[in-house]
Amino acid sequence: MTSSSSTTATINAISRWLNYILAIPMIVVGILGATLTIFIFTRKSSFQRNPTIIYLLAGATMTAIHLPTVYLQSILVDGFGLGIFNTNNLACREHNYLLYVTTVVAISFPCWAAFDQYASTSRDANFRHRWSSIRVVRSAIIGTNLFWSIVYLPMLVYSGVENRTCILMNVTYRKFNDFLLTPLIYTIGPLTLITLFTRGILLNLNRTTVQSHRDHLTRQIRRMLIPQLILLAMSGIPFGLQNMYFNLTSNVVKSSLHRAIEHLCIQIIRLFYHFNFVFTFYIYLYMSSEVRKLFRRMTTKFSTMDSSIQEGMVMETCKVEDSTYI
C-alpha cells in the first residue's frame, strides 16, 4: 500500500469514527435536551406568556424533529455505509426536503427571538406592544413553517440519486441553491439579523426607561439567547459556503486523498453546525438560574416518584412473603 493510499484510508477511518463516537452521542444528547427544553418551558406560566421563550420553544420542537428524522439518516449513510437516501429517489427527495426545511425553520426561531428582544426593549410603546406579543409569535411561527415549506418544494422535484449519491439533478436550481439561497439563508441572513438586532437591543437598553424590561426574567432570557445567537452566526459561515465550494470544484479531477479530505471537512462542518441543535438546552441550563431551578425541581420530583415506586414494590414483596409463610 502506497503512502497516499494509507493516508486516504486513515482519513476515511477518522471520518467514520467521528460519526461513531461524536455524532451518535450528540443525537442522543440533543434529543434529550430538546425534550427537556419543551418540558421545562411549558411548566412555568411566566415562560408561557413570554414571546421570546415561545420562539425558543418552537425551535426546540423543530430540533426534536430534525435530529432523529434528518441528522440520524446522514449519520447512518456516512458512518455506517447504509444506502437509505442514496439508493432510492423517493427517499432522496424526502431527505433533501426535510433537511432544508427543518434546518432553516429551526435556525429562524432564534432570529425571531432576537427580534422580539429588540421589539420588547424599544422606547416606542406602539412598536413594542404591536410586535412583542403572543399574537405576533403565533403568526410568525405558523408563517415561518409555511414559508420555508413552500420555498423548498422544488427539492421534491429536482432531487434524485446519481452514482449512489443524493443530489439536485437540475443544474440551474442547484446553482441557485448553492450560490444564492444557501449562503443567504445560512450565512448572510443570520449574521445580518443577529448583528442588527443585538446592536438594537444594546442601544434600546441604554436608552429605555421602561422598568419591566430590566426585570430578572428578562435578563435571564437575554443571557440564554445571546450565546445561542453567537454560535449560530459562527457555525453558519462554513456551513453556508460549503455547497458553493463543491459546485465550483465539481468539474475538477480529484484524487482519492483529496476526496477523503473533503469528506472529513464535511463531517467536521456538519458536527459544528449541529451544535446549534444539540447544546441549546445546556446553554439555557448554564446561563439561567430560572431554568436550573425548574430542572432541579423536576429531577427532585422524579426522584421522589421513583423512591415511592421502589418502596411500594418492596412493600408488595413483603406482603407476598408474609402470605407465603402463613
Image (tube, grey):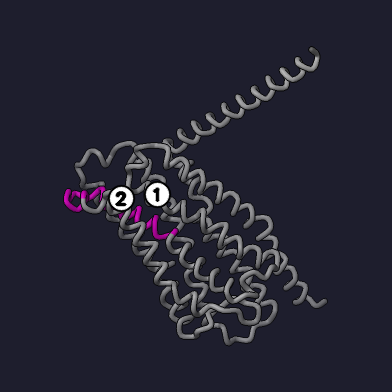
User: Is 150 part of what is drawn in magenta?
Assistant: no
Horizontal side of 3 relative to 206 (left or right) equals: right
Q: Which residue is found at the position 41% from the left and 55% from the top?
A: 229
Percent x, y of residue 19: 66, 60
Could you tell me which quadrant the N terminus lies in? bottom right
Near mark 1 (Cα within 10 A), the count class, few <14, some 14-19 or many ≥20, is many
Q: Earlier in the sequence, mark 2 or mark 1?
A: 2
Q: Which residue is found at the position 29% from the left and 48% from the top?
A: 134
**Which SS class for mark 2?**
helix
Percent x, y of residue 244: 49, 77
Residue that label 2 marks: 117
Residue that label 1 marks: 225
Say whether residue 202 is visible: no
> Residue type at mark 1?
Leu
Q: Which residue is found at the position 59% from the left and 64% from the top?
A: 268
User: Which span of residues is magenta-colored?
Assistant: 106-129
Could you tell me which quadrant the C terminus lies in? top right
Horizontal side of 191 relative to 103 (left or right) equals: left
Quarter occupied by residue 151: bottom left
Percent x, y of residue 17: 70, 61
Pick the front one: 119 or 173: 173
> Residue type at mark 2?
Gln
Give the alpha-carbon distance from disc 2 to disc 1, as whole Å: 9 Å
**Residue contact between numbered discs 2 and 1, judged by CB atoms under 8 Å:** yes
User: Is 112 part of what is drawn in magenta?
Assistant: yes
- The kind of secondary structure the magenta stretch mainly shows is helix
